[in-house]
Amino acid sequence: MIVDLPSSTTSAVNRKIVELRENGGVLALGRVLTLVIVTDDGTSIEAAIEAANSASREHPCRVIVVARGQRRAAPRLDAQIRVGGDAGASEVVVLRGYGPLAADDAGAAMVMPLLLPDAPVVAWWPGEAPPVPSKDAVGRLAQRRITDALASRNPRGALEQRRANHVAGDTDLTWTRLTSWRALLATALDAPPHEDVTGAVVAGEVVSPSTDLLAGWLATSLGVKVKRSPAESGAGLVSVRLDRSSGPIELVRPDGKVGSLRQPDQPDRLVALPRREVRDCLAEELRRLDPDEIYGAALDGVGRLTRGRTPVQVPAAAVSH
């Protein structure tokens, strides 16, 4: 069910939500958090709502979308309420502000009357995020602030902003996309022989912020020199090599779908390593509302990396798979 409220107010939206609950019984009260999505009005809104609806099946929540419209228009708030099949396991409120209501600092005033009482608030910027999310008007309302450097016009520049302005509660989906890589590498190091890693090389696209973050994580976790190099081919994060005295551990993903894990004295293993969808990354981030200290350490590690200029070639055997 979709209910449109053109030229409305937040009070009218709140009354309509209560009315829908009382008359139709379509809105459950078991919401665990409020997810505030901040974006510009456009086609990207539906993709963000779809991802939030998918994540809400694991984390029932109220989703409030602040869609900033034309700033030169007359002041107006167009609202929309989605419930039932159009809202997953959540209730979705879309607020389209125009004129002064499209300003960056106006979103918080529109959101506050609609926040669930005594429930955590998570802010998500699926596109361009403010330089300092924790100082943004909506960001100050939230316990967790989720950004996505990959969705920025300058992904590596956005990652540098995250690194310079990081505070507890911040996280980025470029970090969440690395969960499978981190798990595979940690598992490989837990297996015999238990030798120290003496160095590492992480290769990927020059503009890939996830490649930088994985290299930073290895630098802080292992305490070794890590070289961040461009990849000769492939998109995003392509390969990781961990050097040990008995031989290197190599994890290579040339096609963005299937990876090859190589270890000394063991047969090569093919592992599913597809690029993660935004909805899966968002659902993972909503599982924890405490500060992600490992992400903060990985950001610090980015500043310790050695930058290589020579492209790293993907091993031929990995390509053949």
Image (cartoon, rainbow, N blue to C red):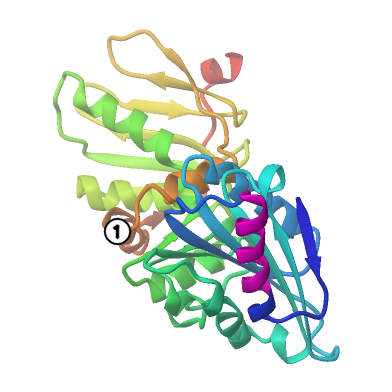
Can you see residue 311?
Answer: no
Query: Which residue appears at 53% of the width and 19% of the height?
Result: 318
Identity of the residue furthest to the right in this view: 73
273 vs 29, nearest the viewer: 29
Query: Which residue appears at 28% of the width and 53% of the height?
Result: 294
Query: Which residue appears at 64% of the width and 72% of the height?
Result: 15
Q: Quadrant of residue 69?
A: bottom right
Stretch of the chain drawn in magenta = 13-26
Query: Considering only vertical position in the picture, is 235 above or below 166?
Result: above
145 vs 74, nearest the viewer: 74
Q: Quadrant of residue 42?
A: bottom right
Can you see residue 35?
Answer: yes
- Whether residue 230 sits left or right of residue 192 in the image: it is right
Q: Which residue bears the numbered disc 1?
A: 290
- Whether residue 256 sits left or right of residue 186 in the image: it is right
Query: Which residue appears at 42% of the width and 33% of the height?
Result: 180
Image position, residue 68 (x, y; %): 72, 76
Query: Considering only vertical position in the picture, is 158 above or below 53?
Result: below
Image position, residue 192 (x, y; %): 17, 18
Image position, residue 210 (x, y; %): 49, 49
**Kind of residue at badge 1:** Asp
52 vs 90, nearest the viewer: 90
Q: Secondary structure at mark 1?
A: loop
Identity of the residue furthest to the front in this view: 23
14 in the magenta segment: yes
Image position, residue 100 (x, y; %): 72, 91
User: Magenta region's main secondary structure?
Assistant: helix
Query: Considering only vertical position in the picture, is 55 above or below 306?
Result: above
